[in-house]
Amino acid sequence: NNDRFVSEAIREKVDAAIKELNYAPSALARSLKLNQTRTIGMLITASTNPFYSELVRGVERSCFERGYSLVLCNTEGDEQRMNRNLETLMQKRVDGLLLLCTETHQPSKEIIQRYPSIPTVMMDWAPFDGTSDLIQDNSLLGGDMATQHLIDKGHTRIACITGPLDKTPARLRLEGYLSAMERAGLAIPDGYRITGDFEFNGGFEAMQKLLAQELRPQAVFIGNDAMAFGAYQALYQAGLR
């Protein structure tokens, strides 16, 4: 390990024996001795969403730069699968845990409480247990700023495609849109507010409805990237840029 003095002759003998026996140090034994696994667990609800893909890439890069490995588990919105993966990560004694869950799919607080020594960070709009660290975006401000940007560009007929309104980010982004429109004194025609699902197809179908309006909007505020990709596809198919 090069952590103490060893004569060159003995070092050469040890190196030769290592090569002959194909010896490799046990990471498991080392983690038991140090009580540290150099791994971070990450639990997400859906890996297909571009938002999660970017987030995972950033976390993995940060782990690599600091000598950690990332163990990623995707629940696909299945609560039973979520809790089984959560238990597995905890049993593996990861050094920290990142939870990207939604308000409608919550991890078991009982499992988390059984492992109080493992630091846990709730991300996105996961349920807050009062003890973990919490990272959330400011959806209200984001909706307001995005809409204000469109207003500043000179647009007056601005539509909105929101996410499911049972989700807090979707509601807050809609509130931001409404606030900016009201502040600018702009009316919102009937049919200009459409509820999507935060997915590609939802954005595609919502944009088709907007394009079918007798008076088409000049601009659209869309609640997330996945729906925006779908909306762009609808515009492309309609021959619009």
Image (spheres, grey):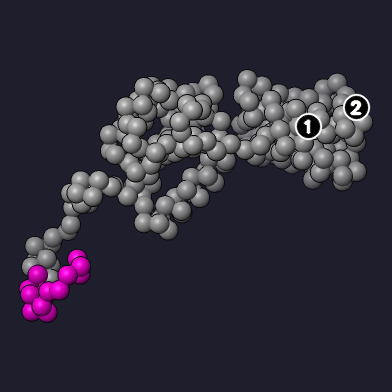
Q: Which residues are magenta?
A: 1-14
Q: Is residue 3 visible?
A: yes
Extreme residue toward the front, this view: 131
- Kind of residue at badge 2: Ala
Residue 201 is left or right of residue 56, and the answer is right
Residue 27: x, y in percent?
22, 51
C-alpha distance separating marks 2 and 1:
12 Å
Q: Which residue is mark 2?
A: 187
Marks 2/1 in contact by CB < 8 Å: the verdict is: no
Q: Nearer the viewer, residue 19 or 235?
A: 19
Does 83 sit above or below residue 39? above
Residue 99 is left or right of residue 195, and the answer is left
Name the image quarter holding the C terminus.
Answer: top right
**Number of marks present in the image shown:** 2
Secondary structure, mark 2, is loop
Q: Nearer the N terminus, badge 2 or badge 1?
A: 1
Please name the residue shown 10% across and 78% down the image: 7
Does 63 sit above or below residue 5? above
Q: Which mark is residue 24?
A: none
Q: Which residue is mark 1?
A: 177
Please name the residue shown 33% across and 36% down the image: 117
Residue 66: x, y in percent?
40, 57
